[in-house]
Image (tube, grey):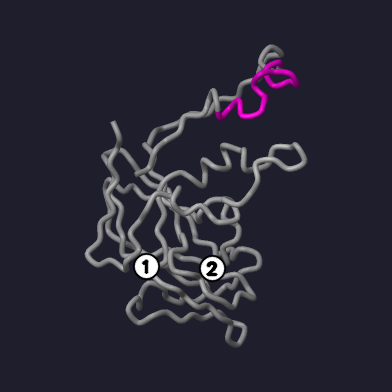
Amino acid sequence: MNKKIEFVSLVTFNNEPESAIKHLPSWYKKAKKYSNNFSTFKNCVPFFDGMYSGYVIVTPCDIEFYEENEKPNFKIDKEFDGFVTLRSPMNEFLVPDGFHEHHFAWTPQWGVRTPSGYSCIYINPMNNFSLPFVSTSGIINNDKVFQPGSIPFFIRKGFNGIIPKGTPIIQIIPFKRNNWKSKKVLISSEDIEHFKPGSKRIENNYYRNNLWEKNNYE
C-alpha cells in the first residue's frame, strides 16, 4: 500500500510540489547511454535514483539575480514578494567554495505532512550541478510538524542572470525513522568472486535488471 504524503499551504505561490521525475534537467535527458561503446552515467541506476526520488518545489516565476558592489541581489515580480529574501552572512558558517557569503532564503509557503514515524530529508536537487545556487540541507520529523518554513541558499559568485520559472529549488524525500547500529564485517574470498571480471554481478545493467527496486512518487 502506498504511503501518503501531504503538501499543505494557506497561500500558494503557484509552485505546487511535484514528483522529482517530472523535473529531470535537460542535460540529463539529452545525454547518451553509450559513448565509444562504453556505458555512461546515463546507465547508472544509483545516479538516476537520486535524481528521481521524492518530490521537488519549484520557483513560481522568473527570478533575476545580479551582483552590485560585489554583493548579490535579486529582482522578483511583486506578486511573489516574500518567496526570496536576502540575508546577512551567517557567522562561523562555512560558505560553499565559489559562492557569496551573503545568502538568501526560499520561502515556498508549502508545509509537508507525513504518516506517523516518517521524516523528510530536504536537499539541493541531487546531481543537478548546472544550478547557480546551493540550497542547504536538513531533516524534519514531518509527522510532528508541518508548517511552512524557509530554506537558506547561496548564489554562485559571478552569476548575473535569471533562474527560470519552474526551476527545482529543493528536493524532498520521505523516509521511515529507525534506530541503527553499525557493524564492521570482513567479506570472504567467495564474496569477492562475485565482483571479479566475468561475474554476472558486474554485467551491464545487472543491478538495474535484477536487484533494483523502483519506488513510485505520485
In the image shown, does 192 or 138 lie closer to the viewer?
192
Q: Which residue is drawn at 56% across and 76% down?
A: 161
Tell me the SS state at disc 2. Answer: strand
- Location of the N terminus by quadrant is top left
Relative to 116, does residue 110 appear above or below in the rendering?
below
Relative to 158, does residue 27 appear above or below in the rendering?
above
Query: Distance from label 2 to label 1 (Cα)?
Result: 14 Å
Instruction: Give the mark nearer the N terminus: 2 vs 1.
Output: 1
User: Label for residue 154?
Assistant: 2
In the image shown, does 139 or 173 lie closer to the viewer?
173
Magenta stretch in the rendered image = 193-208
Query: Is residue 205 magenta-colored?
Result: yes
Identify the residue position indicated by label 1 in the image: 107
Q: Which amino acid type is shown beneath numbered disc 2?
A: Phe
Q: Position of residue 204 (x, y in %)?
A: 66, 28
In the image shown, does 119 or 110 lie closer to the viewer?
110
Q: Where is residue 72 in the image (x, y as percent from the top left)?
A: 55, 79
Tell me the SS state at disc 1. Answer: loop
Q: From the viewer's perspective, tell me whether residue 85 is left or right of residue 79.
A: right
Q: Which amino acid type is shown beneath numbered disc 1?
A: Thr
- Location of the C terminus by quadrant is top left
Query: Is residue 213 magenta-colored?
Result: no
- Where is residue 61, by image quadrant? bottom left
User: Label for residue 40?
Assistant: none
